[in-house]
Image: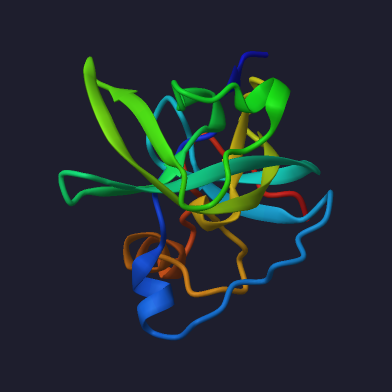
Amino acid sequence: MQQQPATRGWLRRDLLAKGLNFPQDLTVGHQVYARHPESGEYCLGNVTDNSKAVTYYSVVFNDGTSSHDTYPEDILNYNCTEDGPPPIGAAVEFMCFGKRHVGYLRSISERQLYTLSFLDGEGTVVTAERQEFYHPDEGLPSDLKNKLDKPGYLPQRTRIDP
């Protein structure tokens, strides 16, 4: 049972732009739809843990770009693991794709992580942020909603518990 790492930087902007909210308090046992790491298809899974979080730094770089999902350990000129975060506004250095970037720390955020176990019979487990999966009662992506509306359709690699 290999656990996939959390992904970064992906937001459901379509839902946010429409002003739709997603349930924030998903607890262990909730069923959700998420993309299966092997097939890329939406599959049904269960929330099996919601007790972890990830910290991100928002950094504005001197070249005009910015990042809202920089890991603390990616900052080169501070030892964030041992010393804690640099002060807001501090100059920071960051390596990305072999290139050194310099900028300043704009903010720090913490996001809850969820462990999802797919009902695929293989024990596939992923770790995801809340905006990376859907509860059946929320606004589902149109491709998934259209498939679910077809009589007799079941998402690939998925069984639905009654």
Q: Which residue is most to the left?
A: 63
Tell me, yes or no, if residue 121 can be seen here: no
The residue depicted at 46 percent of the width and 25 percent of the height is 74
The residue depicted at 67 percent of the width and 13 percent of the height is 1
Residue 64 placement, left or right of 72: left
Tell me, yes or no, if residue 55 can be seen here: yes
Q: Which residue is most to the bottom?
A: 19
Quadrant in which the C terminus is drawn: bottom right
Residue 154 at x, y percent in the picture: 51, 50
Residue 112 at x, y percent in the picture: 69, 49
**Pick the front one: 91 or 154:** 91
Question: Vertically, is 36 above or below 152?
Answer: above
Residue 87 at x, y percent in the picture: 58, 46
The residue depicted at 34 percent of the width and 72 percent of the height is 14
* Count of all numbered marks drawn on residues in the image: 0
The residue depicted at 58 percent of the width and 47 percent of the height is 129
Question: Vertically, is 134 above or below 19?
Answer: above
**Pick the front one: 73 or 36:** 73
Which of the 4 image quadrants contains residue 19?
bottom left
Colour mapping: rainbow
Residue 26 placement, left or right of 9: right
Question: Vertically, is 135 above or below 128?
Answer: below
**Pick the front one: 133 or 82:** 82
